[in-house]
Amino acid sequence: MIDIHSHLIPTVDDGSETEEISLNMAKGLYEQGVTDVICTPHFTNGYKAEYEEITKLAEKLKADLKEAGVPLNIYLGREIFVTKLTKQQLKEYDRKFTLNGSEYVLIEFDLVNQSEIAETVYEIANMGYIPIVAHIERYEYCTLDEAIEVKEMGGMIQVNADSIAGISKKLHHKMVKKLFKNGLVDFVASDLHDGRDIVMQDAYKIVKRKFGEETAEEVFYKNAKKILKG
């Protein structure tokens, strides 16, 4: 499996406080069957670590994994909280903000307060990017119709593994079911933070059983493989 959304880099956001925690989180992903992971530190008002700092910490994590004998491949990206400044920031930082230096960009929105998700996707897509909406099932105001519009506007949809496994809110679990039934999910990711259960393998089995092996392979591996190709 390839995980396109995780918070493994220590000290740069709320994902991990120490190098040891990050190493254990990475080991947990590998034990769940993840071979490649894109680290996506938050870019919000509270978390704005520079690219150079994140790169340095990522290299240390790679070295720690190698020393521990864990062949987990590490890539870089960001999870961008959308604000009025996002389009300008994308112009300024460009591929330093994208997933693995590709045209794919992971964006998130306010979980409760209404945001124009589809409209934002359209604007970012017009800049030449492929916007991926992070954990769309967690936005309480997002309807199935808007999720459909996200795809029509050139965006892609990522859902969290714990929403599939039923660990998060029932509302999230119900929305994920609707998304899969309508063929709208492009990626399943861990969105891993310290303290969260790693359920990628459980989620894979559920998707395979309910929606077929082909769908499971697409959302856990094939679609993400395109991002790793850059």
Image (cartoon, rainbow, N blue to C red):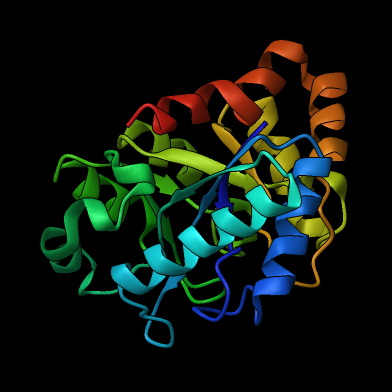
- Viewer can see residue 150: yes
- Between 5 and 75, the one lying in front of the other is 75
Residue 141 picture quarter: bottom right
Query: How many numbered marks, from 0 up?
Result: 0
- The structure residue drawn at horizontal position 84% and vertical position 60%, both measured from the top left corner, is 197
- Between 69 and 146, the one lying in front of the other is 69
- The structure residue drawn at horizontal position 29% and vertical position 58%, both measured from the top left corner, is 97
- The structure residue drawn at horizontal position 35% and vertical position 32%, both measured from the top left corner, is 152
Would you say 64 lies left or right of 39 here?
A: right
Q: Residue 64's spot in the image, x, y percent?
A: 64, 59
- The structure residue drawn at horizontal position 64% and vertical position 42%, both measured from the top left corner, is 72
Would you say 51 lies left or right of 54 here?
A: left
Q: Residue 196's spot in the image, x, y percent?
A: 79, 66
Query: Residue pushed farthest front?
Result: 67
The vertical placement of 195 against 79, above or below, is below
Query: Residue pushed farthest bottom?
Result: 46
Residue 107 picture quarter: bottom left
User: Which image quarter holds the C terminus?
Assistant: top left
Q: Residue 153's spot in the image, x, y percent?
A: 30, 37
